[in-house]
Amino acid sequence: MNYDVLLLYSVVSFFYIISPGPAIFLAISNAITTDLRIVAISSLGNIVGLFLLSSISILGLGALLLASSTLFMVVKIIGSSYLIYLGIKQFRIAKTTKYLPVKKGKTNFKNKLDYFYEGFFLAATNPKPILFFTAIFPQFLDLENSILPQFFIMTTIFMTLSFISLFSYGYISKSAKILFANQRGMSWFHRISGGLFIGMGFGLLQLKSSLS
């Protein structure tokens, strides 16, 4: 594979990945309300979901989703519904939240697998990565050489950049946690995050099945 093409792909992927979206906001939310271990677990789930989408695109199913407006609409509805669900859950938490200082070494949150599945499902039901892996990803493939090695190299780069990006957003957000170190601050954070998730959910419904 041409290294210049690989570098260009990495640059395009980087700017796509760091653009704000549901996964980044989820990482920020987890960093503020839990800890960096949870951010890492959720981010791991997210990149596994991305690997699934990349695998689907290389098998041609991604193109089928783009070609079929019905299938694409189903994916959009599922993805947007999940974002709206996360938003509603944040509003419910805002009504019942009570600030309880977390003791060092002890974290009272939901099962870690739940965070993994949350990150995975958020990625797997998001049409935006489908567009990337179907419309942009194939343009960097060298059809004169074996596709499989290129697939693994490019997908690994994308997953690595995604994980670093999500964890970095979470790490930076952790420094702002002191702003939410009271019940009122936490309640407002959940309201704002809930509104953003719901807004992204409805915005997802406006996504077209083409990059034009």
Image (tube, grey):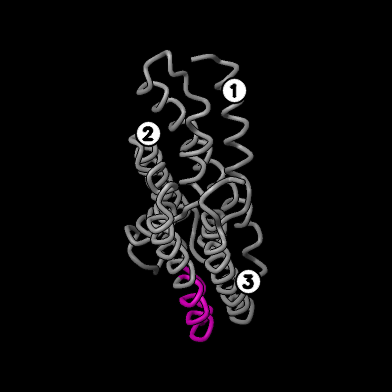
Please name which of the two marks, 2 or 1, marks the residue nearer to the observer: 2
Callout 3, which amino acid? Phe
In the figure, 194 relative to 208: above or below? below
The reply to whether dot 3 and dot 1 touch (C-beta < 8 Å) is no
Q: Who's the residue at 37% across and 16% down the image?
A: 146
Q: For this view, does 87 lie left or right of residue 147? A: right
How far apart are labels 3 and 1 at the CA level?
40 Å
Name the element at disc 1.
helix
Q: Is residue 31 visible?
A: yes
The residue mark sitting in front, 2 or 3, is: 2
- Report which residue position mark 1 lands on: 7
> Which residue in the protein does label 3 denote?
180
Q: Nearer the viewer, residue 172 or 104?
A: 172
* 200 falls in the magenta region: no
CB atoms of marks 2 and 1 within 8 Å: no
Q: Are marks 2 and 3 in contact (CB under 8 Å)?
A: no
Local SS, label 3: helix
* Residue shown at the point (58%, 55%) measured from the top left: 21
Which stretch did the figure color magenta?
86-102
* Magenta segment main secondary structure: helix
Closer-to-camera residue (209/106): 209
Disc 3 versus disc 1: nearer the observer: 1
Where is residue 182? Give x, y as percent: 61, 77
Q: Crowding at label 1, few (<14), some or many (≥20) Cα neighbours within 10 Å?
A: few
Q: Give the left or right position of residue 165, taking residue 76 as reference.
A: right
